[in-house]
Amino acid sequence: MVMRSVARTRSAAGSYSATACVLPSPSTNARIAIKASLDSEIPAARARVAKCILVARLHLALDRKDEAIRWLESGWQERAAWMPFLKVDPRMDALRSDRRFLELMRRINFSPVPVR
């Protein structure tokens, strides 16, 4: 069932991120699909700053907070246009209590948002 959801997301949106980020605990097959998507997105993300948020979300789906923060920092350094959306993006909730995320929010001039 999970793989069908991931496959539908892949064909409709061109990436696994939408479904992968919604799943609270991806199954083994879904994790494999997320990792494959991540492996294909990292080279593209290095070339295009807009992809940094996608790669950060994929890392969060795999509970890799350190890597997610690293990609968000990369987006900040490149002054990515999507940075203001971090404050309200529910997919970032797992990072809201992380001091590095709070520091990033401070640098963007945002006050911290409480964890839901």
Image (cartoon, grey):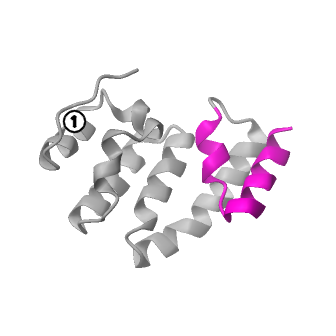
Residue placed most toward the observer, 95 or 5: 5
Magenta-drawn stretch contains 21: yes
What main secondary structure does the magenta stretch of the protein show? Answer: helix
| Residue 34 shown left or right of residue 74 in the figure | right
Magenta-drawn stretch contains 50: no
Q: Residue 8 occupies which quadrant of the picture?
A: bottom right
Q: Amino acid at mark 1?
A: Leu
Give the residue displayed 41% in from the left and 49% down from the top.
Answer: 67
Q: Secondary structure at mark 1?
A: helix
Residue 56 is situated, as x and y percent measured from the top left of the image, at 44, 52
Residue 18 is situated, as x and y percent measured from the top left of the image, at 62, 49
Residue placed most toward the observer, 61 or 67: 61
Count of marks overlaid on the render: 1
Circle 1 sits on which residue? 102
Q: Quick one: which residue is furthest to the bottom in this view? A: 47
Image quarter where the N terminus lies is top right
| Residue 28 shown left or right of residue 58 in the figure | right
Give the residue displayed 58% in from the left and 42% down from the top.
Answer: 21
Give the residue displayed 42% in from the left and 75% down from the top.
Answer: 48
Q: Residues within 10 Å of mark 1 (few under 14, many from 20)?
A: some
Residue 96 is situated, as x and y percent measured from the top left of the image, at 32, 31
Residue 94 is situated, as x and y percent measured from the top left of the image, at 42, 31
Q: Where are the magenta residues, as a range?
A: 1-23
Image quarter where the C terminus lies is top left
| Residue 78 shown left or right of residue 59 in the figure | left
